[in-house]
Image (cartoon, rainbow, N blue to C red):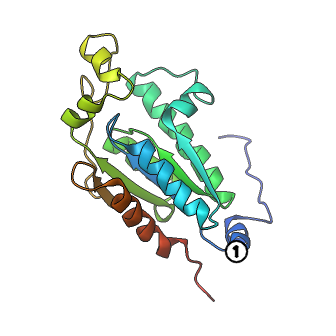
Amino acid sequence: MENIIPHDFHIGKKERNKLNGHKSFVVWFTGLSGSGKSTLANKVEHELFEQGIKTFSLDGDNVRKGLNNNLGFSAEDRQENLRRIAEVAKLLVESGSVVIASFISPLEKDRAMIKKIIEGEDFVEVFVNTSLEECERRDVKGLYKKARAGEIKNFTGVDAPYETPENPDIEIKTEEENLEDAIKRIVLHLQDKLKISVQ
């Protein structure tokens, strides 16, 4: 954009990571509504926090109530919602935090955009793989019932698509794996990524 020149700060991600004693990056949970994304994300953040890792959580409903309360649910608005979230997540990574992000993010092209904004090496994709049938059975927020009744339009899994991630860093099949084991597996995967290489 014309006349916009980003400022070059003396303290950056590298310096903050060194101060914190761990690397910073984004752990992005994707899956259908009711798949268990937020539950998993919350538990993983708690485990990391207990280990002294600086974390910050971003969650769909919370962001929609504040930063993105001017956006609807059209395809364009959904993409803009995710673009803004990715930019915020990138800033938080620069601040030295491990960002725990939980968003349906149903389209592959949008997830590719997110990964590009955040930059690949700072992006860990966790696919919370729960069948539509199970998500509807749980229907924690009563949204599937409303979508089936026609009260909610463009609802992912009902009348809007969810494109399964092709190569997620981690896949959690919630109908086959218990919560505790899933949390351990995710945290274990993140341990090496957290380490700062000694030079």
**Residue 149 quadrant:** top left
* Identity of the residue drawn at 39% across and 39% down: 105
* Identity of the residue drawn at 29% across and 32% down: 138
Residue at the extreme right: 10
Using the image as rendered, state which of residue 148 and residue 12 is in the foreground.
148
Relative horizontal placement of residue 17, taking residue 148 as reference (left or right): right
Q: Which of the image's four quarters has the N terminus?
A: top right
Relative horizontal placement of residue 89, taking residue 135 as reference (left or right): right
Kindly identify which residue carries mark 1: 18
Q: Which of the image's four quarters has the C terminus?
A: bottom right
Q: Is residue 24 visible?
A: no
* Identity of the residue drawn at 40% across and 44% down: 37
Above or below for 13 versus 31: below
Q: Residues within 10 Å of mark 1 (few under 14, many from 20)?
A: few
| Disc 1 element | helix
> Residue 177 placed where, x, y %?
26, 56
**Residue 137 quadrant:** top left
> Residue 179 placed where, x, y %?
35, 54
Relative horizontal placement of residue 45, taking residue 183 as reference (left or right): right
> Residue 168 placed where, x, y %?
32, 57
Above or below for 83 versus 13: above
**Residue 7 quadrant:** bottom right
* Identity of the residue drawn at 38% across and 58% down: 180
Q: Is residue 85 visible?
A: yes
Query: At label 1, which amino acid type do we have?
Result: Lys
Q: How many marks?
A: 1
